[in-house]
């Protein structure tokens, strides 16, 4: 399996500095980062490690859920997945990811709510990004539309 790469160029202190994250493997973009905007309610046009984790988790989860639904003989017409990744203080000092909430709404002809919920829970546990985030509380809100 391939390795994917991103890089960050940073200058300055934590509070005064800033950087740019480059999605090196895909070359789809370079994004500004700064700690003050990372810790603020309004991101002000910059991204953060938490937003990048949320993007990775929502995409990975959608793929895993799609695979599990396919194994049950159904085909998702649509899956709308949102990942909310929260940053907060760490008891040992500094900060940590305090939790992740995955929300999925699906349109899956031929699949009932119980089967969808079962697949959704299995996808939460089986997606590689969820596995990488072991130690972080991940909650799930799953329903068919």
Image (spheres, rainbow, N blue to C red):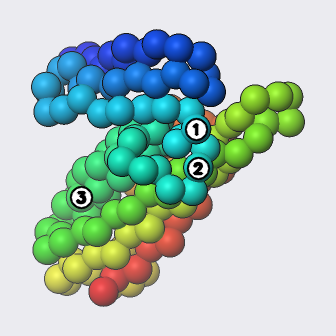
Quadrant of the rendered image containing residue 112: bottom left
Q: Nearer the viewer, residue 73 or 57?
A: 57
Q: Earlier in the sequence, mark 3 or mark 1?
A: 1
Q: Is residue 130 left or right of residue 45?
A: right
Q: Earlier in the sequence, mark 2 or mark 3?
A: 2
In this picture, is 4 found above or below 39? Answer: above
Q: CA distance from mark 3 to mark 1?
A: 37 Å
Q: Nearer the viewer, mark 3 or mark 1?
A: 1
Q: Secondary structure at mark 2?
A: loop
| Disc 1: which residue | 36
Image coords of residue 73 (percent x, y): 17, 67
Image coords of residue 136 (percent x, y): 64, 43
Q: Secondary structure at mark 1?
A: helix
Q: CA distance from mark 2 to mark 3?
A: 34 Å
| Disc 3: which residue | 66
Q: Residue at x 44, y 73 (%)?
A: 142
Image coords of residue 62 (percent x, y): 29, 56
In the rendered image, the residue lying farthest to the right is 91
How many marks are shown on the rendered structure?
3
Do the numbered discs 2 and 1 sit on residues whose CB atoms are within 8 Å?
A: yes
| Disc 2: which residue | 40
In this picture, is 68 found above or below 129? Answer: below
Q: Residue at x 50, y 72 (%)?
A: 141
């Amino acid at each position: 399996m391939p390795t994917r790469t991103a890089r960050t160029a940073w200058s300055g202190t934590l509070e005064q500095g800033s950087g740019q994250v480059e999605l090196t493997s895909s070359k789809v973009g370079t994004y500004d980062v700064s700690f003050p905007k990372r810790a603020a309610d309004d991101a002000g046009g910059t991204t953060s490690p938490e937003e990048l984790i949320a993007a990775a988790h929502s995409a990975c989860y959608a793929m895993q859920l799609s695979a599990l639904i396919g194994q049950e003989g159904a085909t998702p017409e649509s899956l709308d997945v949102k990942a909310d990744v929260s940053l907060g203080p760490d008891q040992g000092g500094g900060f940590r990811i305090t939790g992740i909430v995955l929300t999925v709404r699906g349109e899956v002809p031929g699949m009932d709510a119980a089967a969808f919920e079962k697949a959704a829970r299995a996808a939460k546990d089986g997606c590689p990004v969820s596995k990488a985030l072991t130690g972080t509380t991940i909650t799930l809100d799953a329903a068919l539309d």
